[in-house]
Amino acid sequence: MPIPLTKAIHKFPRVRLGHTPTPLDAAPRLGAALGIELWIKRDDCTGMAMGGNKVRQLEFPLGEAQSGDADTLLITSAVQSNYVRVAAAAGRRLGMETHIQLEERVPDVDALYRSSGNVLLDRLFGATLHSYPVGDDEPAADASLDLLAQSLAEAGRRPYVIHLAPAHPPLGALGYVLAAEETLAQARELDLAFDAVVCPTGSALTHAGILVGLSALGVEIPVYGICVRRDAGSQAARVRQVAEQLAAMIERPEVFDGDDVLTFDGVLAPGYGRLNDAVREAIALAARQEGLLLDPVYTGKTMAGLIEHVQSGVIPAGSRVLFIHTGGLPALFAYGDKLGSWLSDVPWAPSGEVVDVDLIDYH
C-alpha cells in the first residue's frame, strides 16, 4: 500500500511562509474574450514580499536550512528573479543573512531593469548582492555559490545553499504537490472539474509539482507548461527529470508518466525575460478585461501560450481551464520602458479634463 501523500510530504522539514490556501477565482470577462471558462489559481497572493510561487517553493528548502541551524542563506538566479526576492524576505523573517548571486541572463537591459522591480526589493531587504557574468550555465552558477558558501563558513557563518541545477533534490517542488491537493479541494467545493491546467515552466518546480500532485491523487488533467526559458524539447526533459526525482522523494515513483509532460515554446522568442508582441498583448488583455496583472517574464508568456493553445484548438473552445498565476509582479516596474509604448492607446487627461470612458477601445 502506498504511503499517504500528506504523510510522505510531511516527513520533510518545512517553515510556513505563505498565505494559503490562495484564492481560486473565476475570470469571466477574460474567459469570454478567449472563448473558454477561465479560472485563476491566485498564487500571486501568497503574501510574502508581494507573493508568487516562490513562496511555496521556499518553505521546504528553508525548513531544511532551519533544521540544520543555518544562519546564512545563499541563492542564485537572474537579475530580476522572483526567487531571490522572496528568499531575501524569508531570510530576514527567519533571522538569516542573505547572499544573492545575480546572473546575466537577459541581454541589452537598461538602468531601470537593474534598479527597479525585484532588485529594488532585494536591496530593501538588505541582501548582499553578487554579480555573476554568465546566464546559461546552472552548474557553474551553483559552483560559484558553493565557493562563496565555503568562504562564509571559513569566516564562522553557517551557510545553506539553494542550488538551481536539477542535479540537486527538488525540495521546492514539494510545495506544488501540496498546491495541487489544495486546488483540487477548492474545486470540489465549487463542483468544478477542469479540462486543462496551464502554468509557466522554467525551473520546472511548479510544473513538476502540479503533475506529480495530480497524478498521486488519481486525477488525470492535461497540464500545459508554457516555456519561459528553454525550447520545448529541452524543457520537457527537465520537467521529466525533476518529476521523477520528486515522485521518488514522496515514495510514489509509479505515479509519474513521462508522456504526461506537455511543453510549448511558441511564445518564447526572443528568449528568457524578453518581450514579444503576443506577450504584450496578453498582459494588456488580462489587465483590461479582468483587472488582472501579469508579469513580462512568466505569467505574461503563459497567458500568451494559453491564447495560442485556444486559437490553435489544442485547448477546445468552451473548455474549463485553470491558469496557475505564479506572481512575479514586481518585474512589471523593471520593464516599464518596454511596456510603455503599448500603453499609448489609453488616453491621459491633462489636469482638469475628464476622459470619456465610452470612447476608449479596450479590445
Image (cartoon, rainbow, N blue to C red):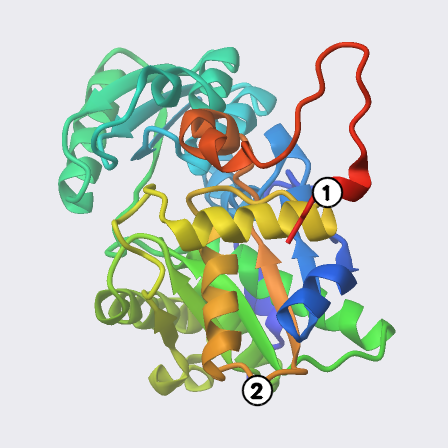
**Is residue 38 toward the left or the right of residue 60 in the image?**
right
Q: Residue at x 16, y 30 (%)?
A: 144
Residue position marked by numbered label 1 in the rendering: 19
Label 2 vs 1, first from the N-terminus: 1
Looking at the figure, which quarter contains the C terminus?
Answer: bottom right
Q: Which percent across, then down, holds residue 348? A: 66, 23
Q: Which percent across, then down, holds residue 188? A: 81, 77
Q: Which mark is residue 220?
A: 2
Depth check, front residue: 128 or 228: 228
Q: Residue at x 86, y 73 (%)?
A: 189
Q: Secondary structure at mark 2?
A: loop
Depth check, front residue: 153 or 357: 357
Q: Residue at x 34, y 19 (%)?
A: 114
3D distance between C-alphas at marks 2 and 1: 27 Å
Depth check, front residue: 96 or 34: 34
Q: Residue at x 57, y 83 (%)?
A: 221
Kind of residue at badge 1: His
Whether residue 167 appears in this view of the structure is: yes
